[in-house]
Image (cartoon, rainbow, N blue to C red):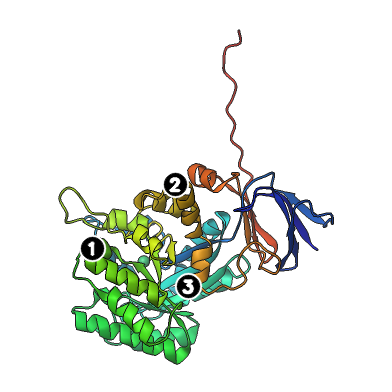
Amino acid sequence: MSLIIRHARVRNQKETVDIAIEGEKISAVAVNLPSSAPNEIDAGGNLVLPGLFNLHYHADKCLLGEIMRPNVSGTLPEAIEITNDFKRSYDPVEVAARAVRTLEQGVKNGTTFFRLFCDVGTIGGLRAARGLLLAREKMKDYCRIQVVAFPQEGIVRDPGAAELMEEAIKEGCDVVGGLPWYEYTDDEARRHIDICFGMAIKHDLDIHMLVDDTDDPNSRSLEYLALKTMREGFQGRVAASHCGAMAAYNDVYAAKVVDMVATAGITISVNAHINLVCSARLDREPRRRGIARVKELLARGVNVATSQDDVNDPYYPFGKPDPLECALMMAHVAQLTLPHELEAVMDMITVNPARAARVADYGIAAGMRADLVVVGAPSVHEALRLQPPRLHVFKDGREVARSVLTQELLSHRASS
Ligand SMILES: [Zn+2]
């Protein structure tokens, strides 16, 4: 074997274990492995997780905050308008350079899988797609990347977008995106979903849509997305992000939709950061938060993920990006604070998005891909609380990032 990580704390196991890695795979996980390897790392009783996920990230827009005019209203429509000004003249090389800067930071924070959304439409054409496909190529030794062809201006209301999405898929996009709630009418939202399914079936690709990202209780495209998923036999192949309108639905309708989502095997990806900032800008007090009904989804067995939607762009001015920060934010907005709920939160940046992306060889066990992160804390609770540095990050059994930061309290106490 090529590498052993000693004294690793893995979830749901009392004793620390040693993790042996041979090439790109984990070859053994056991207490006190007797064998040795040319490269050994002592995790020192710290938590070791499989590589973290960011399942929903608009890397084409990242860091526009460094050069844009401010989003005065703080709303999604103004964010879209500001971005459009840049999109008209995007240079794919420049898009890739911005994306790579934040992807590198994400890797340092333990992210080994990103699902990137590139705007595809008549305003920016294929420029953003080409930028993110280039970023994927540049980052291939550090992380796995899927690129979603995402119709940010809609499909029916942006004639030509569907054809451009087809082109983006031909050029290498992996997932069919969607934004049905942004269409002008309910009928057109359904047509939007139908068009996306047509593409996904034709190219045998999965689907990830941004759904009902509004406070309007009449925004109901999730219901039709679930129905279509069942009818087309796409269970387990569809993810829906945001779904904030669910919070505004009446309880009876919400329960029906949650049940349909569960039956359809749809993953709900909650992007708490951006919704806390952008949603309910028209509310007086109390303000709603635009967050899907996470506890009800979990209770019904729905696969829930949480991810970093935006990093310093017209939609959201912060973002490290760091999945652990997303998990902490999720624990707050969904009020998940009990020990088993903290475990559920950790699942949302690890096993749940892995299931959504259908990554089969994911986890800490013999035969799994050696994408691992050594977190500078001994438990899930402490990892969430302290947001500690990621001591070592591995992709395919190779160390791709490490932390060398030290913090010390200096002695100034008077001696007695
Ligand atoms: Zn988004």
Residue under pointer 2: 338
Label 1: which residue?
Answer: 251
Q: Residue furthest left?
A: 284
Quadrant of image for the N terminus: bottom right
**Is residue 267 something one can see in this rendering?**
yes
Q: Position of residue 357 (x, y in %)?
A: 50, 73
Q: Give coordinates of residue 274: x percent, y percent.
A: 34, 57
Q: Do the residues bearing badges 1 and 3 touch, measured as CB atoms within 8 Å?
A: no
| Residue hosting label 3 | 132
Say which of 81 and 93 sits in front.
Answer: 81
Mark 1 Cβ inside 8 Å of ligand 1: no
Q: Name the one closer to the observer, 397 or 83.
A: 397
Residue 157: which numbered mark, if any?
Answer: none
User: Along the polypeptide, which appears first: circle 2 or circle 3?
Assistant: 3
> Is 235 positioned to the left or the right of 382 in the image?
left
Depicted 109 relative to depicted 415: above or below: below
Q: Of the two numbered discs 2 and 1 on the same chain, state the one appearing first in sequence.
A: 1
Q: Earlier in the sequence, mark 1 or mark 3?
A: 3
How many neighbours does mark 3 have within 10 angstroms: few (below 14), some (14-19), or many (20 or more)?
many
Could you say whether the residue bearing mark 3 is in a helix, strand or loop? helix
Q: Residue at x 60, y 67 (%)?
A: 362
- How many numbered discs sit on the rendered protein? 3
